[in-house]
Amino acid sequence: MLEFLIEAGDQEGITDRQLADMLIFLLVAGYDTSKNVITYTMRIMLDHPDIYARCSEDWEYTGKVIEEALRMFTPASTFRATREDIVHRGVLIPKDTTLFFLLNVAGGISADIDNPHSFDPDRPVDGRPRYVGFGLGKHMCLGQYIVRAQLQEGFHLIARHMRNPRADGEPGWRPFPGNWGIQGLPIVFEPTEIPPAA
Ligand code: HEM
């Protein structure tokens, strides 16, 4: 991919600085985020061993587990600057104010979800995700479909390889905001050999 980007950059006149910025963004947006969701999902699974055990056998179900984890947690927070005065519900937000959107809160306490604080991969869905962890509008996450697939695939594989995980210490947390999440999740588990695919 790097070679492709460098080649495309040469053809389209993209500067080295622009290319470097693009790669930094891709690594932060495309790697750090997914890693944090996987760690968060594992943290939740320590309290739900039955759900975790099912992830090792059931790829479809793993997708539901990931979707529910994304509802309860997102590593991303978005910022916007107002370009003019805005009145929202009677509150004046002056021009040039930086607004900070807590996307995590929206999924975790949404009023139109039953028992929003419980982790329930089988909760009914009507085709519309009940969270905004990938943002909204024209800057909505470009990677959201690939990352759902990656997380489903990756977590299924993790569950097949790492049986019976248990906590082995307290997790640490990164400072909020930024690319937020757990920093270090000590666990013990039983490694399992998986025969290579035929
Ligand atoms: C769980 C993983 C991820 C989460 C929670 C996430 C979240 C977000 C959010 C909230 C935004 C909107 C930012 C804003 O409005 O200011 C965004 C934008 C973006 N994301 Fe993701 N992201 C994830 C994974 C990825 C991956 C894997 C890629 C690329 C392979 C990616 C590429 C992008 C890009 C390019 C944008 C900018 C879109 C634009 O400005 O038009 N993201 N992401």
Image (cartoon, helix red, strand yellow):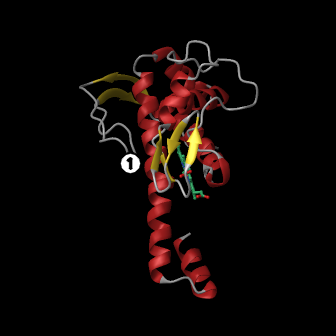
- Work out which residue is located at the far left of the displayed protein and give it: 169
Q: Residues within 10 Å of mark 1 (few under 14, many from 20)?
A: few
Q: Amino acid at mark 1?
A: Gly
Residue 181 visible in the current orientation: yes
Give the position of the N terminus as an image quadrant: bottom right
Q: Residue at x 67, y 32 (%)?
A: 129
Q: From the viewer's perspective, is 198 left or right of 69?
A: right
Q: Is residue 191 above or below residue 31?
A: above
Q: Residue at x 46, y 59 (%)?
A: 27
Residue 180 in the image, given as x and y percentages of width and height = 39, 42
Q: From the viewer's perspective, is 44 left or right of 115?
A: left
Q: Which residue is mark 1?
A: 178
Q: From the viewer's perspective, is 130 left or right of 169?
A: right
Q: Is residue 195 above or below residue 29?
A: above
Residue 197 visible in the current orientation: no
- Work out which residue is located at the far right of the displayed protein and give it: 126
- Work out which residue is located at the far top of the displayed protein and give it: 115
Q: Is residue 79 above or below residue 20?
A: above
Residue 37 in the image, given as x and y percentages of width and height = 47, 38
